Amino acid sequence: MHGLAFDIAHLLSGGLVLISLMLLYQVRLYSLINVFAAHAVVLGLAVAWQAFVQSAPHLYVTALIALLFKGVVIPVVLYRMVQRLGIHRQIETVVGVGLTMLCGIGLVALSIMVMLPITEAADVLTREDLAFALSVVLLGLLLMVSRRNAVGQVVGFMSLENGLILAAAGAKGMPLVVEISVAFSVLIALIVIGIFLFRIRERFDTVDVHVLDGFRGEQP
Amino acid sequence: MILSGEAAMASILVIPAVAAALLAVISSYRLGAVLNVLATALTLAVSSLLIFARPAPSLYLHVDDFNIFLIILNTFVAFTTSVFSASYIAHELESGRLTSGYLRFYHAMYQVLMLAMNLALLANNIGLMWVAIELATLTTVLMVGIYRTPAALEAAWKYFILGSVGIALALFGTILIYLAARPAMGQGLDAMAWTLLVSHATSFDPALLNLAFIFLLLGYGTKVGLAPLHAWLPDAHAEGPTPISAVLSGLLLNVALYTLLRFKILLTANGATLAPGVLMTGMGLISLSFAALMLYRRRDIKRMFAYSSIEHMGIITFAFGMGGPIASFAGLFHMTMHSLTKSAIFFAVGHVSQAKGSQRIADIRGLTESHPMLGWGLVLGVIAIAGLPPFGIFMSEFLIITSTFARQPLLAIPLVLGLLTGFGALVLRMQGLAFGEPSPGNAPVHASYVPLFVHLAIVLAAGVFLPGALVSWFRAVAAMVG
């Protein structure tokens, strides 16, 4: 039984890393949002599996938040936003897709090489989970720096945050996980509302963050 | 009626929460401003009770020598800033930069920010500490963007993204600390309570602690504004309302540094980890030198003092990185002095930029002639922040330099160079701002000078004479920080 439990946990968190890599090469906003929804669903399954294996019922709440809020609500809102703002064209990336993918593979290797040797004392499930979680976090960071578009950066941040929830769920018996995932959901909701509320589109005719740089108050 | 320690600790959190709820429904901005001042005054009064009655630590909250002084400093500066804010926002309303609806939001957010900072300082649970820092980030983001100009929105967005990444990394570090503690302390809340973590620290896995500290340093270091993670700080200071710049520089940076120091104590208690001090001295020196150079090319007055904040946070981080009784003492003292001086400077700058209708340094000249009180207040503030005697910052910088010379003479060279560079930039700019032919824009200001001069008087008094009780108490905390 332990072997199977471990394999499924491994499969799900490995799937999360794979989807993170998939996020890196999406050049259209709609497909980026679709892949992110898949990311959130896999996270929800991974956390639910952890809840089952650790028999920690409160983790089901976190799993449910991931499934419903990040897997359904946020993607739908983003979809409508992209439609409303009329920005369903290609996303401008900072460097080419090939180079970004290579960096991504390097980051996954790095996080595995960093995490596995130092967590030898911990049990196997935690170790693997943590290594995968760190990869997802680093890939999320990479996604954020490789996109100039505000929606792209938000998706990058949300995938980064999924990695953190995975780590928190994998740390057996960690208190406050539910509270932290709720706090993060508030943060994400605010970011998404922020794009709307700040009307980045209406004020600048673009959600390309690069354009915002020009408004810095430092011109002579 | 004398409150018990537990009740005092709870009311430090409850008063801002209740005040925020009230302020959110009060539409009159005058009443709101008065209530804001009253609530911060009450919080200050209650927090000073903690000196006499100290509550026993629980799994969530605790009070010890280290955080009690920051709580009192925090509530004090929050109180004086609310007094300044009352006179500042009246002008913003007249000039039409803010509407009364936004002011209601502003006052409520001010109290939520106080709640978040007090919670971060009081928290014993490292997860709770993280949640509080996140709450503080969110409220300040909303306040930085309150003017809704393109520049303000850019600043808020930048702060939002960088701040979020920072706190995300800090959470990863927090999870790793829990994982390091779990084998020794078992599952559950115990393994996240700081007081219990420190007493068990020797049995933690040093490698995990190392990795955790690197994440925490990057995460909370972003909030402290250490270079190269400082990019959000100048924009957020320059574009938000000036009371918020004062609170950001004077309080929030301190709170973020405080959380970092808690984890430094944890690593030092373990003993087998890499020395956290080396990383901190490195980042401190980089921030100091970088910010000192950046001071020269600033054209915006608030942006310039924001870079000065980066410089001083660099100095403080360096001092704590050096460690030892003298350097840590100087670091704590510098934290206090910088907080008071920088908020005083922002009080003056807020009124100056309102009077001149501009934040550009080129538009502000000859202040001592056109607005003598403000002008001289700003001059005194700049003298204090540049580290000239007899102000308190001179004393702490002197202590840092001497202890560095005694222990690591080579590190003293970049330290002194950075300090002198920053000093030169500030004095150069101060001459242009304060003296010479006054620039147009001589509108009289209805300023409240009391907060400005009270802060400067405290900084002056602390530089001339520090009471024995305070010295011995600072020493005790310095011994704790290590």
Image: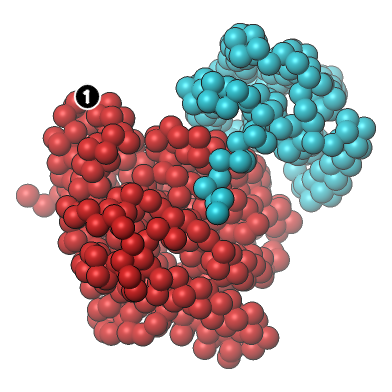
> Quadrant of the image for the C terminus of chain A?
bottom right
Query: The residue tagged with tag 1: helix, strand or loop?
Result: helix
Q: Residue at x 22, y 69 (%)?
A: B372
Q: Quadrant of residue A154?
A: top right
Q: Residue at x 48, y 61 (%)?
A: B304
The foreground one among B279 and B223 is B223
The chain assigned the colour cyan in the figure is A
Tell me where residue B217 appears, x and y as whole percent.
62, 55
Name the residue that disc number 1 marks. Answer: B25
The foreground one among B76 and B344 is B344
Q: Is residue A215 above or below residue A32?
A: below
> Quadrant of the image for the N terminus of chain A?
top right
Mark 1 packing: few (<14 Cα in 10 Å), some, or many (20+)? few
Q: Is residue A110 above or below residue A151?
A: below
Amino acid on which disc 1 is placed: Val
Tell me where residue B343 appears, x and y as whole percent.
34, 60
Q: Residue at x 52, y 88 (%)?
A: B402
Residue furthest toward the bottom?
B406
Q: Is residue B250 above or below residue A38?
A: below
Question: The numbered mark 1 sits on a residue in which chain?
Answer: B
The foreground one among B170 and B101 is B101
> Is residue B21 in view?
no
Tell me where residue B361 appears, x and y as whole percent.
43, 60
Left/right placement of residue A162 relative to residue A105 reads left
The chosen color scheme is by chain
Q: Residue at x 36, y 44 (%)?
A: B241
> Is residue A183 in view?
yes
Residue furthest toward the left?
B1
The chain assigned the colour red in the figure is B
Tell me where residue B195 appears, x and y as whole percent.
46, 55
Q: Quadrant of residue B228?
A: bottom right
Left/right placement of residue B91 relative to residue B319 reads left
